[in-house]
Amino acid sequence: MIMWKVIEENNNDQTEMRGFMKKLKLLIVVLACVLSVSGCTFIQSKTEKSSITEKSSITEKSSETEKSSETEKFSETEICTEKIDWKNMKDKKPVIYLYPDQEERVRVKLDYNGRLTCTYPDYENGWNVIAKPDGTLTNLKDNRQYSYLYWEGITDVNLDMSKGFVVAGSDTVRFLQEKLAYMGLTPKEYNEFIVYWLPILQENKYNLISFAGKDYEALAKLTISPEPDSILRIMMLYKPLEEPIEVEAQKLEQFTRTGFTVVEWGGTEVK
């Protein structure tokens, strides 16, 4: 009886122990789940915050990079780039060639009724160059060689376009080759003119084209020393058109080169 009672007590103890172990395991599982969920939530929260911080940092860096890029681009072109009031006319790429009879020093001054926006070489109240008969120029300020003197400017002066020519964009090359040669430009000069203006003019269905006369002389007066024997100045005015219009044909004059010759060409869009 005593032995059986001891055995019975041992069995009861083991049963209680197994019950305790089950409860302990259950408690461990519950704690593990709680810790796991809390941990995941914490990790997820931290990850999201990190992600947001990274995105914010990337955005800020991207914004700074874009601003820096824009600043760099501006600094590269700031010499000849500025905000233009397009209500005014912009005289684009007038270039001046000098052809003296012999190599000599030449001073060129431009009295422009407007505001110069770009010059090359730098104008600085006039250009002083050594000019050769083939047109090669050496700028005395920087001792560099140039093919011509370049300027651009804006003005509110309107030039006469009452006479001219209506030219289809697709006919630009033929028209310019014919008219520019007739007015006196050499193949080298009119090819340089066409290379610059062709991409612009051919994009329009039609263009009303006129060549400025004495009113352009008054707008942009040239003073050259020594005084040239002959001067040819061609300023093309153009206005884009969707449809052809009727306009009185402009009578063009031919030019003869004699002695020290100065040639200028340029253009402007009339709004």
Image: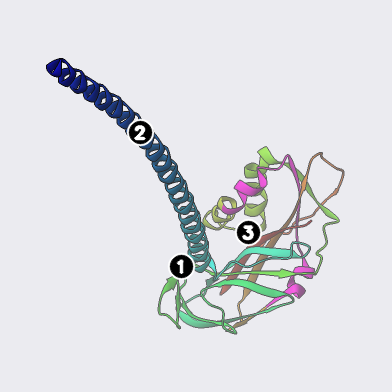
Q: At 40% from the left edge and 79% from the top edge, which residue is drawn?
A: 143
Work out which residue is located at the far front of the displayed protein and give it.
Answer: 1
**In this picture, residue 141 sits left or right of residue 247:** left
Residue on which the image places disc 2: 27
Whether residue 201 is situated above or below residue 5 in the rendered picture: below
Looking at the rendered image, the quarter that the N terminus falls into is: top left
Mark 3 → mark 2, Cα distance in angstroms: 104 Å
Q: Is residue 50 magenta?
A: no
Q: Nearer the viewer, residue 252 or 196?
A: 196
Whether residue 111 is situated above or below residue 170 in the rendered picture: below
Q: Which residues are magenta?
A: 196-221
Residue on which the image places disc 3: 184
Q: Position of residue 46 (x, y in %)?
A: 43, 49
Q: Position of residue 99 (x, y in %)?
A: 52, 71
Mark 3 → mark 1, Cα distance in angstroms: 16 Å
Residue on which the image places disc 1: 134
Marks 1 and 2, the one that precedes in the sequence: 2
Work out whether residue 256 can be spotted: no
Q: Mark 1: which amino acid?
A: Asp
Q: Mark 3: which amino acid?
A: Gly
Marks 3 and 1, the one that precedes in the sequence: 1
